[in-house]
Amino acid sequence: MNTSFRRTLKSLTAAAATAGIIAAGATAASAHVSVDPDDTAANGYSHLTFNVPNESPTAKTTKLEVTLPTDTPFTSVSVKPVEGWTAQVVTGDLPKPVTVAGATVTKAPVSVVWTADEAHQLGQNQYQSFSLSVGRLPAEGTKVTLKAAQSYTDGSVVKWDEVSAEGQPEPKHPAPSFVTTADDGAAAAGASAAPGAEAVSETKQVSTDATSVWGLVLGAAGFVLGAAALGLVLAGRRPRTAGK
């Protein structure tokens, strides 16, 4: 093997190693615990799906704990069963009373904990999805942050609790989150005020006016016919003049 070939081989090996490190870093950066809501409309209900990858090359994921918001609490939380995992919805006192849908709330679900049995712990290159049905969602434009803690068989706990700041690089362990959008009811109200709604209203008014005119005409005709019929009846009842 000549010197030139050996140098080329070393260069290719180094490049491959660098590419592997970059790829591994990109994979680690993208393998976050994340949340995917199926609906973000304010004042509504949503199915939240948490995707949980196992990031440890040696340990298995045994537990996931998600902390629910207490400043804009969910008054309804239910869990979709996952085979081999037990789920517990923890209810607690809120830091201060909160008004939700016109009612004062002092207690609400504050966290959900999923725990795996030994046969269903997440190993290397595995992930699991966990789903919640929650409501009601807070006002439009609210960032709902759902901090999570992922426990491993080696005793380590990875906390996904760093809040992303706008315009800043994503933190190493970002907290799952989403932002609420416009209330579906508000959207419907906005649609009724859209161009064309006024024209529909005017058409209905014209139709109503025409119906009213025809009603008056028919009513008057009925009155005339009724009066004529009454006159004929009365005329028939008059006594006949003698000799006629």
Image (spheres, rainbow, N blue to C red):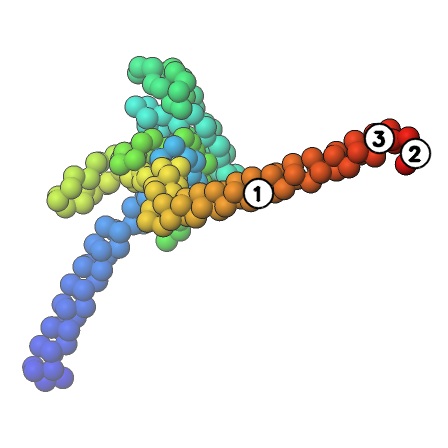
Which labelled disc corresponds to residue 237?
3
Helix, strand, or loop for circle 3?
A: loop
User: Which amino acid, mark 1?
Assistant: Val
Q: Which residue lies furthest to the front in this view?
A: 243
Q: Which residue was labeled with disc 2?
A: 243
In which quadrant of the rendered view does residue 109 lie?
top left
* Disc 3 residue type (three-letter): Arg
Mark 3 and mark 1 lie on one chain; the one further toward the N terminus is: 1
The reply, left or right, for residue 33 in relation to residue 118 is left
* Disc 2 + disc 3, Cβ < 8 Å: no
Which of marks 3 and 2 precedes in the sequence? 3
Residue, x 56% and y 39% (percent of image)? 216
Do the residues under discs 3 and 1 have CB atoms within 8 angstroms?
A: no
For disc 2, the neighbor class at 10 Å (few under 14, some 14 to 19, many from 20) is few
Mark 1–mark 2 distance (CA, rounded to whole Å): 45 Å
Q: Nearer the viewer, residue 101 or 199?
A: 199
Callout 3 crowding tier (Cα within 10 Å): few <14, some 14–19, many ≥20: few
Residue type pointed to by label 2:
Gly
